[in-house]
Amino acid sequence: MKRCPTCNRTFEEDWLAFCTQDGTTLLDEPTARPDAPPPTILSSAPPPPPSGGFGSGQFQPQPVPPPPPPSNLAQPFGAPGAGQFQPGQQMQPGGWSAPPPPTIQGPRQGLAVASMICGLFSITFGWCCYLGTLSAPAAIGMGIYQLVQIKNKPDEAGGKPLAIVGITTGAVYFLGLILIILLYGAAILMGGLSNR
């Protein structure tokens, strides 16, 4: 349950944040416990006794003024409902929201990622139809270019480990290809010599 500190209206809806009558921020009203005594209600002053008797003249009781409404001391200065809303003003739909945080862009590493992908493709699927002869040089070239960019502009370019992986896997493909060619050539030579 929530209560408006200005007009003392109570609201059952928990989703309400502001009074529908005057726009003041609502305060959470503690729920009554079953073992708690009922709240004390101030009543108006009793009617004055008949004139001429006890209580007449200058010692007649005065009516008790109603207590002042509590102030919004718990709210920080400038918070919604801390005195900015004037009665009769239209509230903005949706309220206000904080601006989105600034986007922080890290160093560019697109070529390093492409180099690594081409290098990994070369050593895994590049053996089929010798597709690695296209992807391995691309991996080596993009990796070297990215390393040069990292050296010249370290705050703008990144991905050094990825570029190194791309260069290494591209070189491993070429070394494996050269080894296969040499072994194949040696096998042909050995086969040719054994036929004589």
Image (cartoon, grey):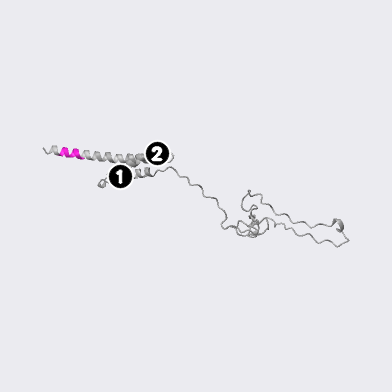
Q: Are the residues flagged by discs 2 and 1 in contact, CB closer than 8 Å? A: no
Relative to 88, say whether 102 is above or below. Answer: above
Q: Identify which residue, 86 or 62, lies in the foreground.
A: 86
Residue annotated with mark 2? 150
The image position of residue 150, as x and y in percent, is 40, 38
Q: Which mark is residue 16?
A: none
The image position of residue 79, as x and y in percent, is 61, 50
Q: What secondary structure is marked by label 2?
A: helix
Q: What secondary structure is marked by label 1?
A: helix
Q: Tell me what residue is drawn at x 26 percent, y 47 percent.
A: 128
Q: Tell me what residue is drawn at x 37 percent, y 38 percent.
A: 148
Which corner quadrant holds the N terminus? bottom right
Mark 2 or mark 1, which has the lower sequence index?
A: 1
How would you rate the neighbour count of disc 2 (Cα within 10 Å): few for under 14, some for 14-19, many for 20 or more?
some
Name the amino acid type tagged 1: Ser
99 sits to left or right of 46: left
Residue annotated with mark 1? 135
How would you rate the neighbour count of disc 1 (Cα within 10 Å): few for under 14, some for 14-19, many for 20 or more?
many
Cα separation, mark 2 vs mark 1, equals 22 Å
Name the amino acid type tagged 2: Ile
Relative to 137, say whether 54 is above or below. Answer: below
The image position of residue 130, as x and y in percent, is 25, 45
- The part of the image, by quadrant, that contains residue 38 is bottom right
Magenta extent? 184-191
Q: Name the front one of labels 2 and 1.
A: 2
The answer to if 135 sits in the magenta stretch is no
